[in-house]
Amino acid sequence: MENEEILQVVAGACDDVRADDIIALNMNQVSLVADYFLICEGNTERQVQAIARSIKDAVEEKGVASVKRMEGFEQARWILVDIGDIVCHIFHKDERSHYNLERLWGDAQQVALHIGQEK
């Protein structure tokens, strides 16, 4: 499965647990860290953890990738989920505007996500 398809699986997993403000950035031209960043937020620490679990379960269930590393799960203020070429940033709503990754990586092109549509 291509990275773009994995990105859609991850976005769907976020949407399934009602993550808010889900966006994806194409990082190919601006960073060597990853091909894509997916950024979203949850309203509570429990929801932020649920989003991270949903991502992990979705990629492993589909057999398309595996989580290489997950950071920040216990505090659940900003969880980073590393899926190799895709890095997911799951913020608590109170933290997202503070770190403002969309602005920091403003040169990255936003990727259209196909969430909330018939599969």
Image (spheres, rainbow, N blue to C red):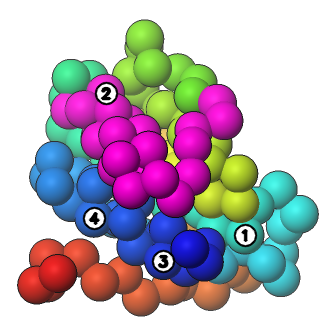
Residue type at mark 1: give it. Asp
Q: Residue furthest front?
A: 63
Give the Cα separation between the discs numbered 4 and 3.
11 Å
The residue carrying mark 3 is: 5
Please tell me how crowded label 2 is: few (under 14), some (14-19), or many (20+) other residues with Cα within 10 Å: many
The span picked out in magenta is 47-69
The residue carrying mark 4 is: 12
The earlier-in-sequence mark between 4 and 3 is: 3
Please tell me whether mark 3 sits on a helix, a strand or a loop: helix
Q: State which mark lies toward you, 3 or 1.
A: 3
Residue 67 position, x and y percent, is 57, 38
All told, the count of numbered labels is 4
Residue 16 position, x and y percent, is 16, 55
The earlier-in-sequence mark between 3 and 2 is: 3
* Left or right, residue 106 beside residue 15: right
* Left or right, residue 103 beside residue 33: left
The residue carrying mark 1 is: 35
